[in-house]
Amino acid sequence: MVEIKLVSTKKELKEFIRFPHDLFRGNEYWVPPLDSDEMDTLRKDKNPAFEHCEAEYWLAYKNGRIAGRIAGIINHTANKKWGKFVRFGWVDFIDDIEVVEALFRTVEEWGKSKGMEKIQGPLGFIDMDNEGMLVEGFDKMPTIANIYNYPYYPQMMVKLGYEGKEDWIQFKMKASQSIPEKMERINNLIKEKYNLKVLSFKKKKELLPYAKPLFNTLNLAFSNLYGYSELTEKEIDRLVKNYFTFINPELVCIVVDEKDEVVAFGISMPTLSKAFQKAKGKLFPFGFIHILKALKNMDEIDLYLNGVHPDWQKKGVHSLYYVEMNKAFIRNNIKVAITNPQLENNINAVNVWSNYENEPYLRRRCYEKVL
């Protein structure tokens, strides 16, 4: 017998956040997010996304023990563009079809009660939240921007009648690859033709004035990507506060036009996956030490975010920041890079990696179902 309980107290929300720690205990590939970040994202009084989203969270119990969790989210901004969708996210469960059916039936019925016509996920409130269910790469260490799950997860989705809708793919490659002379010549021609400047940074104070304009460009660059919800000013402020306080400015490249407006950008970060594992979801008392050490380790990096303003796409601008970042990788003797998740049908973005030696790394999938 499965019991589904709506999360309604702070204690239950903590249990909701901590459940995966029990489910994945002993798994060498699962990367636990920071509990404090999860709490701030899921709390209505902390996350500015609740100005245009609503959400509920449920825990599944079997034999008196927590056996699964799921969040139901309605992003009203996204739905104005994409249709009447309820999203499911923060979904984890034991290998038990009875538990899975109960969880998804609950969020499906909640969505229908709100007038929704379809369900999709895993998705978060905004695209900066983790999204997609792992379908390939179960034996690989994910980045902190990834959801990890067991192989039985996608099998359950098929049993429930969900259809795979979109895939995100990632590649692993040698970071410090030599830059072809031909590419350098082409980049110089692009900069001269369009009067563009490629900015690199040594100090955070040099980078911060470009932080908000960068996310404004991201809004435009991502606007037509699957399920994208435009970031609000408050959401951008939160992202700048959360990420630009510890970002390494040497691993950021920004391309600006003659008006000093951001037309393209690339952001990389030292890989933090193992540090997050050591932290076990807690910054204190010692978790932050593991993260600080990892931020200084440049052996492996994650290509975290990149984008090109729509007016500048298909003009070769992406090559400018990739080459500049590659130079930074060479200077810092970085050995391995994991690309950021990119939609497989986003051909312009995915084809960038054809210029580099790479191998497939992870594949994640978003599922949909008519209610």
Image (cartoon, rainbow, N blue to C red):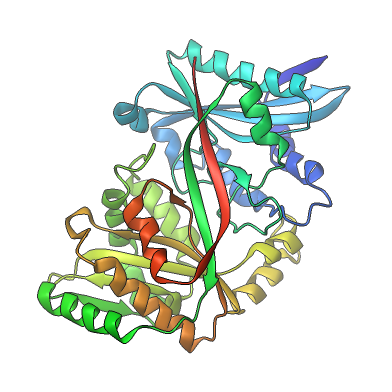
Q: Does residue 207 appear left or right of residue 105 in this picture? A: left
Residue at far right of view: 63
Question: Is 287 located above or below residue 13 in the figure?
Answer: below
Estimate the x, y position of residue 17 in percent, counting from the top left: 69, 41
Estimate the x, y position of residue 163 in percent, counting from the top left: 52, 27
The answer, for residue 253, to whether it is visible in the render is yes
Residue located 48% across and 43% down the image? 167
All told, the count of numbered labels is 0
Q: Quadrant of the N terminus?
A: top right
The answer, for residue 10, to whether it is visible in the render is no
Q: Does residue 109 appear left or right of residue 190 in this picture? A: right
The part of the image, by quadrant, that contains residue 351 is: bottom left
The part of the image, by quadrant, that contains residue 274 is: bottom right
Residue located 79% across and 23% down the image? 61
Q: Does residue 168 appear left or right of residue 2 in this picture? A: left
Residue located 68% across and 43% down the image? 149
Q: Does residue 114 appear left or right of residue 99 in this picture? A: left
Q: Nearer the viewer, residue 277 or 225?
A: 225
Q: Nearer the viewer, residue 170 or 263?
A: 170
Estimate the x, y position of residue 260 in percent, counting from the top left: 18, 71
Question: Is 95 located above or below residue 246 in the figure?
Answer: above
Estimate the x, y position of residue 106 in percent, counting from the top left: 62, 17
Residue located 33% across and 59% down the image? 307
